[in-house]
Image (tube, rainbow, N blue to C red):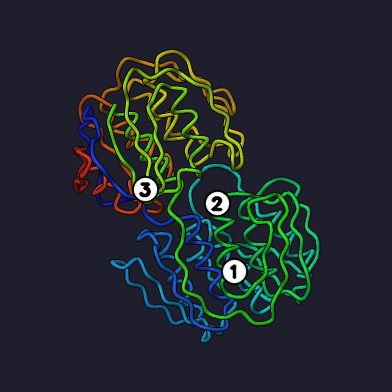
Amino acid sequence: MDSYKLLITGGIPLVGETYVSGGKNTSVAVIAATLLSDEPCVLENLPDIEDVHVLIDILAGLGAKVEYQPEERRLAVDPRGVNSCKVPYHQTQRMRASYYMLGALLGRFGQAEVGYPGGCSIGARPVDQHLKAFRAMGAEIRERGAKISAKGKMTGCSVVFDRITVGGTINAMLAAAKAEGNSVLYNAAREPHVVDLANFLNSMGCRVKGAGTDTIRITGQKKLHGSVYTVIPDQIETGTLMIAAAATRGDVVIRGCIPTHMESLTAKLLEMGVAVSDMDDAIRVRTVRGHRAVNIKTQEYPGFPTDLQQPMSAMLTRAGGDSVVIETIFESRFKHLMEMRRMGAQVQILDQTAIIQGVPELYGAPVTATDLRAGAALVIAGLMANGVTEIYEPSFIERGYEHIEEKLRALGANIRREPLEEM
């Protein structure tokens, strides 16, 4: 259990300017990809979040020389000293994206032993499509106890994913980067962080084409050189800040983002009556009238992101009318709404569908974060609510949002930490 709780006194519109940190989902992919290099690499604009710290610990445990400067958002990795293919269970349990070590170690050594990944409990997230790709490239897979072992010479091939999988696409790209010959990934994920990984691999001398489409072609290279690379801004943090600004009836300029990545969210906010305007690398969000109810269905990129469903559905609890939210990616992503019932939210949940009846106000109450994006949703609920909201288990939020409390306070939010009372 966390040693502190978050206290939010709501009802204050967010006003001012803020910035977006480097992408969490990009960072965990490119940090793993540094293992493929035959020379040192430098990554810039990394967010100072728990998932980044976990991967740094994993790299160091494998024998890599790492030098992290959190104030500079900069990580130098020299992978030449890596002398192990095993990532222990106690480390992989700390985050979901630890499974990228499988693809990276297979790509580098042709073998890997990685404990089953942990991370947020938001439903089944099977790795069967990852293993399908590895087997197609020539790996023998053994699953025993709490670990996955893979071994084999990676050879280029065609992989047709049975369903769109971001993690499977990234893992296959990592394994194919140094494979012998050409690989083609069909029905590939198109998310911005898939494109960013492709750009990083290309900066090291790999040949990746088609990232951002459903067909990615990779020509494996025997040697990959070092690179200095800057990761893209965080799409989900951008969206969370946009929703927080709209939900509090505020006026916020979010700088350092990529507006084209936010088109599905922007469209929904406009439909609700929120004013959204884009600049080259900034978005302004302001509320000029009451919010209308809307319907949302999560989809793979460029559709509405599942990672923004939870913050957005929190906002919908106070929209005028009934909203319908259909979650198609993960089956356990409505736990935050169950918590928000304590705050006065009117919600019905039927399997993968939530029917949200907007209410005039929410009121502060004790609630518990059950995963990363649920934590962000509860923060937004607390910012909207009258009175004080207590959020327990807030460390989930630290996994993916860099200094979110400080950013919100700079916009006028009343949010602070308080130690838990001794039992």
Q: Which residue is mark 3?
A: 397
In this view, the mark in front (3 or 2): 2
Horizontal and vertical percent for residue 244? 34, 35
Classify residue 364 by image quadrant. top left
Amino acid bearing label 2? Pro
Q: CA distance from mark 1 to mark 2?
A: 14 Å
Report the residue at 28% width, 66% height from top: 71
| Disc nearer the start of the sequence (3/2) | 2
Tags 3 and 1 touching, CB below 8 Å: no
Tags 3 and 2 touching, CB below 8 Å: no
How many residues crowd mark 3 within 10 Å: few (<14), some (14–19), many (20+)?
A: many
Report the residue at 53% width, 39% height from top: 306
Q: Which residue is mark 1?
A: 201
Q: Which residue is mark 2?
A: 192
Q: 52 or 184, which is in the foreground?
A: 184
| Disc nearer the start of the sequence (3/1) | 1
